[in-house]
Image: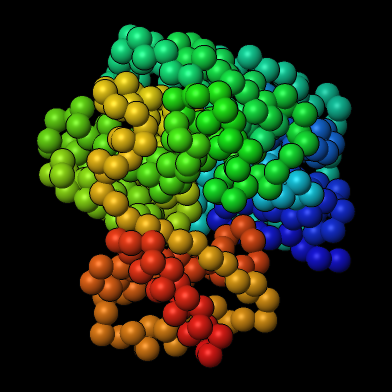
């Protein structure tokens, strides 16, 4: 029987194929042991059949002697924030993030409200592979508490960001097309936007769990939403993935703002409102060079980490960064909590746009212009380490970084090869000053892979 994908990003698999009751119970039981049978927050991204997985995990934790707090349908960042705020011993977000409809999974959260790091993950997985424990006697079983109103706490925490000029945002009366892919953002995001004085035009915000498009919020998957922005003459479009930790924007022209530019805009807003000595940011190694330029404009410091939310967070803590994130549309603001959070991202980009007199497309033109292309190949039967070593030797004269796959920096462009944490693929990311140069570099690298 196929096994689920196990990585620093949790566990993901196809229901009935690589994800089935036996291994769901196995990993839920292991997490109960890892947290010493303590207080665990759970919630799900709302996708189809997620309720069955939730019931299985809830029952497993209960019979393992844990106190369970169930948020039901909630974004992953809301679940993580609840672990921190409610002083729980851990959390499980039941989600497959941007993976297709038939997938589901589990993201494991430590008592700090952040994902398990590599050392913690290793210890947890050791519990999964060791023999289990007997169910405690009935008089030792704890309670299950349902807490569907916790998202209100999350919204209020975001609205209280110190640098947020809520009055100015409300004055702009932004008309926003919102696409939540019928998942966890469907309930919390319209409420947040309305409290910020926005008029919300919903697209797939029914919360049915049925995806009407491929859930990853990349340009080819959000064409319907782009058309809705133009048709409704909206100021912008907002798109999130099923567990609402990634934020992607659409300009008033119905054109993608660029997922890389979500974190660029958020960092731009936070740094300009921060004293110079505190202007420190962190992004991952696959993020756009536009971040480097913006941080440079503010005379700040920029650090980079391997891809993966926990990697960015650990680097942020180490260098005392005030803002960070990932180029896939994830924004991290420690003031709210350490974790990628579309609610935080929405607040910061609207704060930035409210202070700009022009339109969203005009704002985008004022940012450093780069073109990033992302391709992927099936990694089945490929030794990624061998492939990366060959490329490192082939381009040895250029600066390179091997912290996360292989990144090679050319004079006015770069390429990053990395094995995905969540899918059986190798990602090839190229960026240059023009789309044609980025495309040319990507084509060259794909040809090099074929010949290798």
User: Is 406 positioned to the left or the right of 44 in the image?
Assistant: left
Q: How many marks?
A: 0
Q: Residue at (50%, 37%) from the top-left corner?
A: 254
Residue 42 seen in the current view: no
User: Is 406 positioned to the left or the right of 76 in the image?
Assistant: left
Q: Residue at (59%, 30%) from the top-left corner?
A: 228
Q: Quadrant of residue 54?
A: top right
Q: Height in image: 296 above or below 171?
A: below
Foreground: 35 or 146?
146
Residue 402 in the image, given as x and y percentages of width and height:
38, 72
Residue 400 in the image, given as x and y percentages of width and height:
31, 74
Q: Residue at (54%, 30%) from the top-left corner?
A: 229
Foreground: 230 or 207?
230
Residue 363 in the image, given as x and y percentages of width and height:
30, 35
Quarter holding the N terminus is bottom right
In this picture the colour scheme is rainbow
Q: Height in image: 387 above or below 321?
A: below
User: Is 185 positioned to the left or the right of 373 in the image?
Assistant: right
Foreground: 220 or 14?
220
Residue 91 in the image, given as x and y percentages of width and height:
61, 36
Residue 179 seen in the current view: yes
Q: Residue at (43%, 42%) from the top-left corner?
A: 257
Q: Height in image: 176 above or below 214?
A: above
């Amino acid at each position: 029987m196929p096994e689920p994908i196990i990585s620093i990003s949790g566990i993901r698999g196809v229901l009935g194929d690589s994800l089935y009751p036996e291994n769901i119970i196995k990993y839920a039981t292991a997490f109960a042991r890892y947290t010493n049978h303590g207080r665990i927050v759970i919630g799900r991204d709302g996708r189809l059949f997620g309720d069955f997985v939730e019931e299985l995990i809830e029952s497993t934790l209960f019979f393992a002697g844990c106190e369970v707090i169930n948020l039901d349908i909630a974004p992953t960042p809301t679940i993580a924030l609840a672990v921190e705020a409610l002083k729980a011993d851990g959390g499980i977000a039941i989600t497959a993030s941007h993976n297709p409809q038939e997938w589901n999974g589990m993201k494991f959260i430590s008592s700090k409200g952040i994902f398990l790091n590599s050392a913690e993950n290793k210890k947890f997985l050791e519990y999964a592979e060791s023999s289990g424990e007997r169910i405690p006697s009935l008089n030792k079983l704890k309670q299950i508490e349902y807490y569907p109103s916790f998202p209100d706490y999350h919204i209020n925490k975001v609205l209280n960001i110190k640098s947020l000029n809520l009055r100015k945002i409300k004055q702009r009366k932004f008309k926003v097309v919102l696409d939540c892919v019928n998942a966890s953002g469907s309930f919390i995001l319209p409420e947040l936007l309305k409290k910020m004085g926005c008029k919300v035009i919903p697209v797939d915000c029914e919360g049915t769990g049925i995806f009407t498009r491929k859930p990853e919020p990349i340009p080819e998957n959000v064409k319907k939403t782009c058309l809705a922005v133009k048709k409704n003459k909206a100021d912008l479009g907002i798109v999130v993935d099923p567990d609402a930790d990634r934020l992607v924007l659409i300009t008033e022209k119905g054109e993608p703002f660029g997922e890389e530019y979500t974190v660029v805009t958020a960092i731009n807003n936070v740094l300009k409102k921060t004293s110079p000595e505190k202007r420190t940011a962190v992004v991952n190694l696959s993020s756009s060079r536009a971040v480097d330029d913006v941080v440079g404009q503010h005379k700040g410091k920029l650090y980079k980490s391997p891809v993966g939310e926990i990697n960015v967070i650990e680097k942020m803590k180490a260098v005392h960064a005030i803002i960070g994130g990932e180029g896939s549309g994830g924004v991290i603001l420690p003031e709210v909590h350490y974790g990628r959070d579309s609610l935080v991202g929405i607040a910061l980009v609207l704060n930035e746009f409210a202070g700009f007199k022009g339109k969203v497309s005009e704002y985008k033109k004022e940012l450093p212009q780069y073109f990033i292309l992302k391709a992927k190949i099936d990694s089945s039967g490929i030794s990624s380490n061998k492939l990366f070593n060959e490329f490192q030797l082939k381009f040895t004269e250029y600066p390179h970084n091997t912290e996360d796959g292989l990144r090679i920096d050319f004079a006015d462009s770069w390429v990053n090869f990395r094995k995905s944490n969540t899918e059986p693929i190798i990602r090839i990311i190229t960026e240059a000053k023009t789309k044609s140069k980025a495309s040319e570099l990507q084509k060259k690298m794909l040809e090099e892979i074929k010949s290798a």
